[in-house]
Amino acid sequence: MLNKLKSAPKKTVGTKQTLKAVERDQAAVVFIAQDAEEHVVSGLKELCQQKGVEVVPVATMKELGEACGIDVGAASAAILNQ
């Protein structure tokens, strides 16, 4: 599934951007790092549940950041609808 994120033409990286995308119904799939602090991602998890957006857990923030092509960890990311 992370390969899809790597090759996605449109994506968000970071909780603020991902939250905005979910609010605007632009997110197809959301990835959340399991080692992210709960208070950072709890609102995003709830919103995804309300909107019916699939959430894919990723083991670490480092792994998610690498999949997004950045040198730092990421708490969350999303593949956007085309």
Image (cartoon, rainbow, N blue to C red):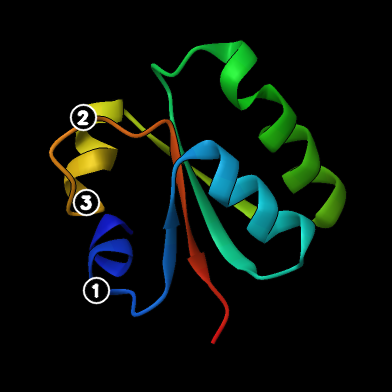
Q: Position of residue 56 (x, y in %)?
A: 49, 46
Spatial separation of the CA atoms under disc 3 and disc 2: 9 Å
- Note whether residue 53 is visible: no
Q: Position of residue 23 (x, y in %)?
A: 78, 56
Q: Looking at the image, is mark 3 or mark 2 earlier in the sequence? A: 2
Q: Position of residue 82 (x, y in %)?
A: 54, 87
Question: For residue 7, which numbered disc appears in the image?
Answer: 1
**Relative to residue 32, is residue 79 depicted above or below?**
below
**Relative to residue 40, is residue 48 depicted above or below?**
below
Q: Amino acid at mark 3?
A: Ala
Residue at image location 66% in from the left, 46% down from the top: 19
Q: Residues within 10 Å of mark 1 (few under 14, many from 20)?
A: few
Question: For residue 67, which numbered disc appears in the image?
Answer: 3
Q: Secondary structure at mark 3?
A: helix
Residue at image location 31% in from the left, 28% down from the top: 59
**Relative to residue 38, is residue 42 depicted above or below?**
below
Q: Residues within 10 Å of mark 3 (few under 14, many from 20)?
A: some
Question: For residue 46, which numbered disc appears in the image?
Answer: none
- Outermost residue on the right side: it is 50
Spatial separation of the CA atoms under disc 3 and disc 1: 9 Å
Question: For residue 62, which numbered disc appears in the image?
Answer: 2
Q: Amino acid at mark 2?
A: Lys
Residue at image location 62% in from the left, 65% down from the top: 27
Q: Looking at the image, is mark 3 or mark 1 earlier in the sequence? A: 1
Q: Residues within 10 Å of mark 2 (few under 14, many from 20)?
A: some
Spatial separation of the CA atoms under disc 1 and disc 2: 18 Å
Q: Quadrant of residue 33?
A: top left
Q: Looking at the image, is mark 1 or mark 2 earlier in the sequence? A: 1
- Outermost residue on the left side: it is 71
Figure quadrant of the N terminus: bottom left
Q: Secondary structure at mark 2?
A: helix
